[in-house]
Image (tube, rainbow, N blue to C red):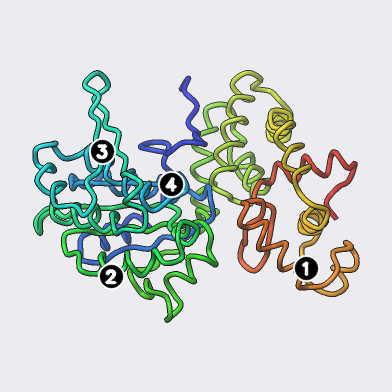
Amino acid sequence: MKTENPFKFGTVAHGPYFTNRSSELQFVAAALNGANHLVVISPRRYGKTSMIHQALQLTDRPKIELDLMMVTSTTDFAAQLLKQVYKIYPFQRIKGFIQQFKVIPVINLNPVTNTVEITFSAEAAGKPVLDDVLNLIENLASADKRSIVVLDEFQEIHHLDRKLAPGMRSVMQHHKNINYILMGSQESMMREIFEQKKSPFYHFGLMMNLDRIPHDEFESYLSKGLEQFTPQSSDLARSILEKTGSHPYYTQQLGWFVWEQLRNYPDHPDPVNSAIENIEAMHDLDYERMWNNLNKTDQKLILGLIHENTPLLSGQNLVKYGIGASSTAFSAIKRLMHKGYIIKAGQQYVPEDPFFAGWLLKKRGESII
């Protein structure tokens, strides 16, 4: 009997923890094997980072990754990107190119930790220091061993500087030794960047919309992970997916807790709902903080989305939940999507965290209509 829980959530999933995505991996591989760039759009926690990491493990090409949510300015963008370059290329190989930068960065090497800290002086602000770093990556690569540059949460370039996109595109479009993978979780902003004709990044690369894992494939994966404890593993798998709506992160999370329930209590009559109660209890303070940080309009909208199986923005529903005008509801939806509280599933807007939804209804003494 396996003693290690086969489900994993909250971190990048590798190896046996990675769930299917075979067709998506083939698409990524095809893009990287050619001269194309790739644009990946999916809500947060759908597993796009795990999928890309899985694809990158299949190649020995140089890989540079950066999450733009962690970047505070254009110069910080350049510094953090250059720091990643130093992780894969020797100092002596980079040194000559650095000396040609328009603004020379301050580089401190720590011989004890073997890490590097990089900063640009105040005079670098407003100057194309990022161009130098991007061109450095191009120059360090070669035609027979192109680099792969992954920029996650790419929509954040608009928050860093609205003028950043034209400058980046003017540099990146000339690169022949780099495959760029540009990922984002804010669908409307990503589509604005890559699908609007006036945008500098219009049709920059192949578009990939990462959806939820197909129900049948996820059910098989869950059932296999639970079968050592019960002959009802298929029924439990279907119950888990019904509770999570096949959301990759929350399905793995609930699968983990159900597995632990069955390991400790093999004859438990309802391990799925018991696991959900444990999850809700564990996040009780977090959920309370989330709810209290919402304004009243956002609270009303979330309650409406939880209760309704039809589009909320009809006049009748707006009145029913006291939201007001359609424009108010649309503004709230945009705000809540940006904060990650709700996502779009098909044609519906739904709470991102199904366990938060369940916790909220229990606190209010309600049930789903």
Give amino acid for label 2.
Answer: Ser
Give amino acid for label 3.
Answer: Val
The reply, left or right, for residue 246 in relation to residue 94 is right
Check disc 1 and report its element: helix, strand or loop: helix
Give amino acid for label 1.
Answer: Thr
Dot label at residue 106: 3
Front residue of 187/276: it is: 187
Q: Which residue is mark 2?
A: 170
- Spatial CA distance of label 4 from label 2 is 21 Å
- Spatial CA distance of label 3 from label 2 is 26 Å
Task: Please state the horizontal and vertical placement of residue 98, each as a whole percent of the image.
Answer: 16, 47
Q: Residue at x 73, y 62 (%)?
A: 332
The quadrant holding residue 205 is bottom left
Give amino acid for label 4.
Answer: Val
**Direction bottom: furthest residue:** 197
Q: Are marks 3 and 4 in contact (CB under 8 Å)?
A: no
**Disc 2: CA contacts within 10 A as few (<14), some (14-19) or many (>=20):** few
Task: Please state the horizontal and vertical placement of residue 112, each as a whole percent of the image.
Answer: 24, 18
**Disc 1: CA contacts within 10 A as few (<14), some (14-19) or many (>=20):** some
- The mark lying in front, picked from 1 and 4, is 4
Quadrant of image for the C terminus: bottom right
- Spatial CA distance of label 3 from label 4 is 18 Å
Q: Reply above or below: 86 against 55.
A: above
- The mark lying in front, picked from 3 and 2, is 3
Q: Are marks 3 and 2 in contact (CB under 8 Å)?
A: no
Q: Which residue is mark 1?
A: 328
User: Which sits earlier in the primary sequence, circle 3 or circle 4?
Assistant: 4
Front residue of 214/187: it is: 187
**Disc 4: CA contacts within 10 A as few (<14), some (14-19) or many (>=20):** some
Q: Which residue is mark 4?
A: 71
**Disc 3: CA contacts within 10 A as few (<14), some (14-19) or many (>=20):** few
